[in-house]
Amino acid sequence: MDPQDAQCVHAVAYAGDGQVLGTGRLLPDGHIGRMAVRHPWRGAGVGSLLLNALMDAARQRGDTQVVLAAQLQARPFYARHGFVEEGETFMDAGIEHRQMRLRF
C-alpha cells in the first residue's frame, strides 16, 4: 500500500472460495498500475477482466485515455487490449518496462 491507494479505483478478482486471484488499480491521473495475477490463473482471462474493469471505470469518470508501465514480457497482453507502446524502455524496481497508452 502507498499514500495514493485511498484515491484509486481498485479492481480485485476473487475465486469462489474467496482467494484473491488478481488485482489492479486506476490512479486519479489515468494511470493503471499494480496489475498482478497469481501465476496459476494467468492465461485464464483474469487479467483481462481486471484491465477491462479499470478501463471501464476510467471511461465512466470521463477519462479520454489510460496509461501504464508494462513489464516487457506483458506488452503483448496490453497490445491485445489496444494499448500502444511509447518511448524507450526504462527500469523500474530492477525490471525493464515500456510506457503504453490507450486512447478512448
Image: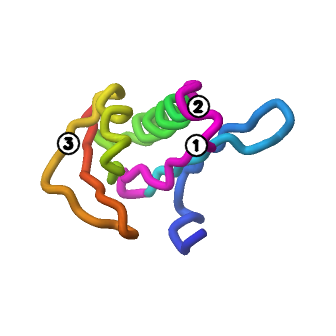
Three-letter amino acid code of the residue under disc 1? Val
Disc marking residue 4: none
Q: Earlier in the sequence, mark 3 or mark 2?
A: 2
Q: Which residues are magenta?
A: 28-46
Q: Percent x, y for residue 32?
A: 42, 50
**Closer-to-camera residue (68/98):** 98
Tag 1 residue: 37
Snapshot quadrant of residue 5: bottom right
Residue drawn 38% across the image and 33% down it: 77
Q: Percent x, y for residue 44?
A: 58, 25
Q: Percent x, y for residue 22?
A: 62, 43
If the image is split into quadrants, where does the N terminus sit? bottom right
Disc marking residue 46: 2
Q: CA distance from mark 3 to mark 1?
A: 22 Å
Furthest residue toward bottom: 3
Q: Is residue 44 above or below residue 18?
A: above
Disc marking residue 85: 3
Residue drawn 53% across the image and 62% down it: 7
Q: CA distance from mark 3 to mark 2?
A: 22 Å
Taking the image as shown, residue 33 lies to the left or right of residue 86, namely right
Contact flag, marks 3 and 1 (Cβ < 8 Å): no
Q: Earlier in the sequence, mark 2 or mark 1?
A: 1
Three-letter amino acid code of the residue under disc 2? Val
Few, some or many C-alpha atoms within 10 Å of disc 2 (few <14, some 14-19, many ≥20)? many
**Closer-to-camera residue (64/96):** 96
Q: Is residue 18 above or below residue 71?
A: above
